[in-house]
Each structure stands twice: as structure tokens, then as C-alpha cells.
Amino acid sequence: MPPRTIQRVMEEKQARREVAEKMISHSDHDKRAFIRFAYDEDMLNPRFYDLVLNTDKLSIDSAVKIIVDAADSNEIKSCGIDPVQLLGKLSLNRRIESLLLKAGFTSAHLFFTVEEANSVRLFGMVNSAGEKEAIENLVKKIKEIRNIKNELVVFTGTMRGE
């Protein structure tokens, strides 16, 4: 645990070192658990970060200067995926997943991808045309979704090799 972080929490909360360390540990755990639950992602995955600074080794003024310089750089400005857009897609993914689970659509053969912020592709196998339509209608209830590509296939055979 970074010593400056511990010291800051000790001062802000007027807590002993042991208590500050526990508070930081619990906070970090809760944040990681939330990101894992809400977005099925690991918040420590480096692909989500363009810049990481160790403020135990840098002063606040130095860190601010580095951040401002980086934010003004052409490399950062031209980055591919917008983090806000990525979080929106992950959030939409979870909402669809929750909606399908709540409606009882839990098949291991039902899949979907959020292709754009407002576009979803349904694919895999379902048991009937009615089920295919019901799944599409459920997903349509999410107001942000403008386009649904329904590639679900109605499977009429058996899974026992018959």
C-alpha cells in the first residue's frame, strides 16, 4: 500500500495506521468488486489506462503537469475507443443480460454482443420462433437500442446426437 496514501487517510480520518490500511484495503476491494460485477471487467487491466502515475514518487504538482501535458498530446487526442463509450457499452451489456435472466432466458446457446452504443446482435440457438421473437422484443424495451440484428436460429432437433 502506498505510504503517502496511508498517511493521507490517517490525516483525513484522524485514524491510526492499522485502521487507515484496513480502510484503504476495503475501499480497493469494493471498487474492484463493483467493476467486476457491473462490467465483468478487471479494473487493473492496463488496456483501460493511457497513463498511470505513482504519486508516492511524484509530487502533486509534477503529476498535474504530466497529466495536463498528456491530455494535450496528439497521441491521447487521437486514441481509438472513448472510455465513456466503452463503459456505456459494458453497462448496456449488463442491462441486456439482466433483462434476459429476469425473463428466464438462461440458455447456454443464447448470445449477444453490443456492437455499438445503440446496436445489438443476437445470435445462437433458441427452441422456437416465439422464443426468438420474445427475446428480440425484450431487448427492444431498452430505450437506447436503435438497431437489433437478430441472427438467432430456431433449433428443432435434439442435442443427444439423434
Image (cartoon, helix red, strand yellow):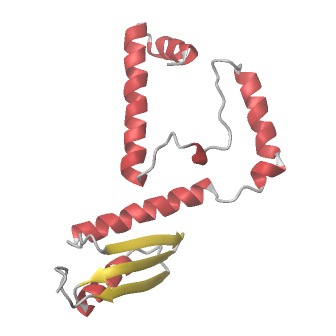
In the image, 97: left or right of 10?
left
Task: Say which residue appears at 42% left-offset and 16% top-offset.
Answer: 21
User: Where does the image place residue 54, in percent across and percent down from the top left?
Assistant: 64, 25
Task: Say which residue appears at 72% left-offset and 27% top-offset.
Answer: 63
Image vertical order of residue 94 relative to residue 26, above or below = below
Q: Nearer the viewer, residue 66 or 162?
A: 162
Task: Say which residue appears at 23% left-offset and 90% top-offset.
Answer: 128
Q: Residue furthest top?
A: 16
User: Where does the image place residue 82, in percent across and percent down from the top left?
Assistant: 64, 57
Can residue 15 be seen here? The reply is: no
In the image, 39: left or right of 69?
left
User: Where does the image place residue 99, in percent across and percent down from the top left?
Assistant: 30, 69
Image vertical order of residue 64 relative to residue 47, above or below = above
Image vertical order of residue 93 relative to residue 9, above or below = below
User: Where does the image place residue 102, in percent across and percent down from the top left?
Assistant: 23, 67
In the image, 160: left or right of 76?
left
Image quadrant assignment for residue 143 = bottom left
Pick the quarter of the image with the C terminus: bottom left
Image vertical order of residue 63 relative to residue 149, above or below = above
